[in-house]
Image: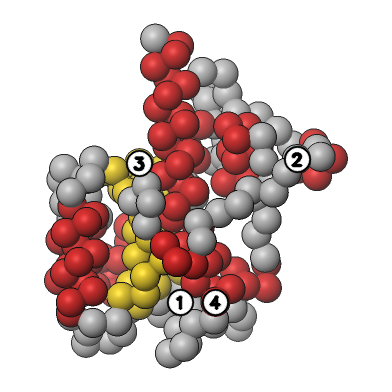
Amino acid sequence: MSDVEMSRAELAAAELPDYPGIPLAQVTLVTSPELAAAAQAALLATDAVGFDTESKPTFLKGEASTGPHLVQLATDDHCWLFTIARGGDHAALRAILESPTVLKVGLGLGNDRSALQARLGISLNNVLDLGEKLRGAGHRGTVGAKVAVAHFFGQRLQKSKKTGTSNWASRTLTERQLLYAANDAHVALRLYRAWQASQRRVD
């Protein structure tokens, strides 16, 4: 597959239909041991899951992040959102993230590995940062979700900066936050499937 290349200017100029995203009906906020068990069973039963985290932003110089405050994991047709509370039971989340058999796919994962280790003692295992895979040889940085969605699906991924920098540590997340977070994980898995298909065509 050729490198995924599209500048922000080209993306802004392109008249693309909106990326629809995963609907709220297919998003579950894990709020009980029963939901955690259901999420664990579904997520460990597949070959790959979309993965991302959200953290309450820091605005003061020298202020340390206390995130992640939310971990998102998606199958092809559903997304589970795990809120991170101090002293909470994260056994189901640990089982999934440390699984050697289930691939965790994300874009721009950055310091997710170190943050999960530092805050929860979870050793992230079997992870693919698709943004790094898509950039191609000789390119710096990573390919973002917006560019990848335009490339593979011919659609425009809308991401609200206001929602992205909202308080992810809040006890009550808004519908916008739930959808924003869920789509970050779900679109990563969809892009991975599309990338896999393009690799097979090349082969």
Query: Residue 128 got which mark?
Result: 3
Q: Which residue is mark 1?
A: 65
Q: Earlier in the sequence, mark 1 or mark 3?
A: 1
Q: Which residue is mark 2?
A: 16
Marks 3/4: CA distance? 28 Å
Q: Earlier in the sequence, mark 4 or mark 1?
A: 1
Amino acid at the residue labelled 2 = Leu
Marks 3/2: CA distance? 28 Å
Q: Is residue 56 left or right of residue 200?
A: right
Q: Residues within 10 Å of mark 1 (few under 14, many from 20)?
A: few
Circles 4 and 2, Cβ within 8 Å, touching? The answer is no
In the displayed orientation, state which residue is furthest to the top: 203
Q: Which residue is mark 4?
A: 175
In the displayed orientation, state which residue is furthest to the bottom: 171
Q: Is residue 189 above or below residue 136?
A: below
The residue sitting at 67% across, 41% down in the picture is: 155
Q: Is residue 45 above or below residue 169?
A: above
Q: Residues within 10 Å of mark 2 (few under 14, many from 20)?
A: some
**Position of the C terminus by quadrant:** top left
Marks 2/1: CA distance? 36 Å
